[in-house]
Image (cartoon, rainbow, N blue to C red):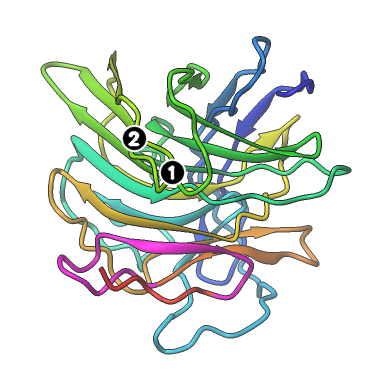
Amino acid sequence: MFGDRSARARWAVVVPRLALVAGIGGVTLIGAGVATAPAATPALQMVPNHFLGTARTIARTSSPSASTPAPCWASSNWSGYAVSQTAISGLPCVPASGQTYTGVTGTWTVPTVTGSSRTSTYSAAWAGIDGFANSNLIQAGTEQDYTGGKARYSAWWEILPAPETVIPSITVLPGDAMTVSITKGSSSQWSITVTDNGKTGHAAQAPFTTTQTYAGPGTSAEWILEAPQVNGRIATLAQYGSAPFDHGTANSVSPGLKVGTGGEMVQGNFRRAQVVSIPSSPDTGAPAGDGFVTAYGSTAPPAPTS
């Protein structure tokens, strides 16, 4: 990507609250696109995979307060929220909804990434279905990377096991309000729509829509800020500041996200793991529980109010 011919992927390791684990279970993704990428951009993928094992304390700069309780799960490259059809072993804090998910929407503000010319860092924001409790995944979103001394942005969609597809018709800029809608139609046909709603000084762009075949079971829906895998390793998360997610729906209604059901991202080796991305509590507006904010670092941001 951007002169680097290495293969990229996205992996997530979901674990109990304040713990990293190894074993079976999981979320793994690989996928998000590359902004304004040259023609020979390496393919990205998402591959869900859970791992459960021995819990351990994770270093953070501050302790969660009563208004921003600790997330219920940790991941090496996911932070955000998911809703699940069934209760997942080892994650009792994510309640079973009993629903099969046939539609998801998400809107977020593209964050501004910063970095160093000597280090490449990566991030992606997306909404999708499946991947939290199985190895299927249909998703779409934006990528925000800092490579070659520059911030780079793009929009993309992806269905495992195929690699991501960059959307060249959409020019993504920081501060843009992006909306993703993924909806099941007849049989196994799904519609994926990505819209750049623009911002002050940057007009909205024509929506991109594609219809694709997808046969996943629809056991979960997610709204995630993620770090990709590069050359077989989870990449360093880009310093993205914060990313507000709002007006999300699952099956055309508010997902009703609950306090204490989100997940934080943890990076570093076994002895020095630290929280690098953390979500706020869900919003308290109307309808409640359809949005949140993720923030770079280990201090949870305030919950949105609308």
Between 250 and 26, which is closer to the camera in this rendering?
250
Could you say where residue 227 lies in the image, as x and y percent from the top left?
61, 45
Between 49 and 52, which is closer to the camera in this rendering?
49
Distance from the alpha carbon under mark 2 to that under mark 1: 10 Å
Q: Residue 283 carries which label?
A: none
State which region is magenta: 281-299
Q: Name the residue under label 2.
A: 204
Residue in view at x 44 percent, y 80 percent: 69
SS type, badge 1: loop
Could you say where residue 26 lies in the image, as x and y percent from the top left?
48, 46
Kind of residue indicated by mark 2: Ala
* Magenta portion: prevailing SS class: loop
Q: In the rendered structure, does residue 285 fall within the stretch colored magenta?
A: yes
- The reply, left or right, for residue 130 in relation to residue 35 is left
Between 80 and 106, which is closer to the camera in this rendering?
106
User: Which quarter of the figure has residue 221?
Assistant: top left
Could you say where residue 247 lies in the image, as x and y percent from the top left?
25, 54
Residue in view at x 36 percent, y 67 percent: 261
From this viewpoint, which residue is outermost toward the bottom?
66
How many other residues sit within 10 Å of disc 2, few (<14), some (14-19) or many (≥20)? some
Q: Name the residue under label 1.
A: 201
How many other residues sit within 10 Å of disc 1, few (<14), some (14-19) or many (≥20)? few
Q: Which of marks 2 and 1 is in front?
A: 1
Could you say where residue 59 lies in the image, as x and y percent from the top left?
70, 75
